[in-house]
Image (tube, grey):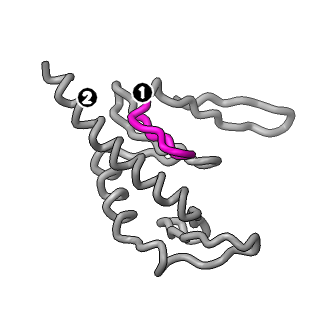
Amino acid sequence: MKKDIVQGRHKLIYITMCDTKVLSQVGESVISRCAECRCIFIWHNNFIMSFSTGQFIEFKNFAEELEFTSHSFPFPDGQERIVMRTPVNDLQLTFTTEQWENFHAAMDQAVYMQEVYSLMERE
């Protein structure tokens, strides 16, 4: 849902989120789903991504194909991070080894919980 907010001379668009239920939370990765619109949200640190169910599965499969060792390099702070490209050329996501493992574990758990909720909704 979008709302216009005026701050001084600037008009901002404020987007309210769905009322979501958490499917999984591992480390800094939280994955939730709206029961009404069925949107799936990945919350990780300072970004939120939203997907349809099919898009989420495609994204999960894409992420599974990326190997940390072949797509990572040391950052200026000395930590090794994987860089995940996005469809927006100027936007990449980065994860440390632990964050990457947690990210995958959260997605695996979310898929499992979606199946559980689907079974419950059929009854």
Callout 1 secondary element: strand
Within-10-Å neighbours for mark 2: few <14, some 14–19, many 20+: few
Q: How far apart are marks 2 and 1 (CA)?
A: 11 Å
Q: What residue type is labelled 1?
A: Lys
Left or right, 32 with reference to 108: right
Residue 69 inside the magenta-drawn segment? no
- Give the answer, above or below, for where 118 lies relative to 100: above
Which secondary structure is most common in the magenta stretch?
strand
Residue occupying image coordinates x 57% and y 66%: 92
Residue reaching furthest to the front? 98
Residue 111 at x, y = what percent? 29, 44
Left or right, 91 with reference to 63: right
Residue reaching furthest to the right? 8
- Asked if disc 2 and disc 1 are in contact, CB closer than 8 Å, the reply is yes
Residue 104: which disc? none
Query: Which of the two labelled residues, at mark 2 and mark 1, occupies the earlier sequence position?
Result: 1
Magenta stretch, residue numbers: 21-32
Query: Which residue corresponds to mark 2?
Result: 117
Residue 40 at x, y = what percent? 39, 40
Residue occupying image coordinates x 52% and y 30%: 17
- Give the answer, above or below, for where 101 lies relative to 44: below
Residue occupying image coordinates x 42% and y 46%: 106
Residue 90 at x, y = what percent? 61, 69
Residue 21: which disc? 1
Residue 67: image quadrant is bottom left
Q: What residue type is labelled 2?
A: Tyr
Give the camera-side residue of 23 and 92: 23
